Image (cartoon, grey):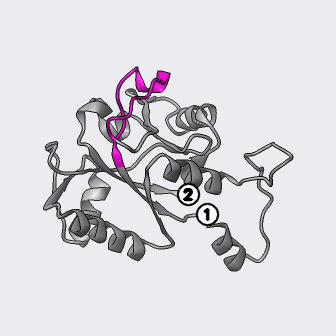
Amino acid sequence: MNLLRKIFSSKQENKEPVNTDLSSPPIELDDAFVQNFISKGGKFLYCTNQKEVNQNLVDIIAENQWRKVNTLDSDLKKMLVIVDINCSETIDNNYPFFTTCEQLISDEGSILFSSQQVRDNKITNLPEHFIVFAKTSQLVRNKSEALMGIRRTYQKNFPTNISSIKSYVPDREDDDFLNYGSHNSKSLYLILLEDL
């Protein structure tokens, strides 16, 4: 992703590195997130435009031979109509859950959700397979920045049901206060759109 930024921008803006260890070169937010995400079993698809997003979505559905997807997001429903994929608002565990997210947490490669994406459903009760559509502007350094970002976004109507997925291999346990001690591992595809 950084290579594309260097090619398409005349002057690279200063970015604060994630890694403060002087023995190794600094890692930028996006690189750190991708490394951590993939190392935990996540499937990552980088896109530079909406056409690539649509094609990747079609390819994921075809590869897994799913006949439809579950989604609770009206904008994502419109995207599914454009690419001619059937969707349902009723959660069916036989089909993947297609959603957006709040933030992408770089230092642990996790994805933060709230009631805006999952409503009152616990992540553990949602299908085993997730397809998440996110943008590079949602990358943050750590949980603290992620929660501050939620506070800024929803100043008066703060969402509930805040939880994260940080293991992308089902059947792996994870104890984290944001997960309420739940088993939140999911087989997850992340379609990341460059928007910076």
Name the residue beneath numbered marker 1: 196
**Residue ID at (47%, 26%):** 178
Contact between labelled residues 1 and 2, with CB atoms less than 8 Å apart: yes
156 over 140 or under it: above or below: above
Mark sitting on residue 7: none
Residue type at mark 2 is: Thr
Quarter of the rendering containing residue 168: top left
Segment colored magenta: 170-187
Tag 1 secondary structure: loop
Residue occupied by mark 2: 136
Name the side, left or right, on which 100 lies relative to 71.
right
Q: Is 173 placed above or below 17 here?
A: above
Give the camera-side residue of 107 and 173: 173
Q: Name the image quarter holding the C terminus.
A: bottom right
Say how many tags the image has. 2
Cα–Cα gap, marks 2 and 1: 7 Å
Q: Is residue 146 magenta?
A: no
Principal secondary structure, stretch drawn in magenta:
loop
**Taking 140 as reference, is 116 left or right?**
left
**Residue 186: image location, x then y, percent:** 34, 42
Residue 181 shown in magenta: yes
Q: Position of residue 108 (x, y in %)?
A: 57, 40
Left or right: 16 as drawn, with respect to 77: right
Circle 2: element type: helix
* CA neighbours of label 2 inside 10 A, class few (<14), some (14 to 19), many (20+): some
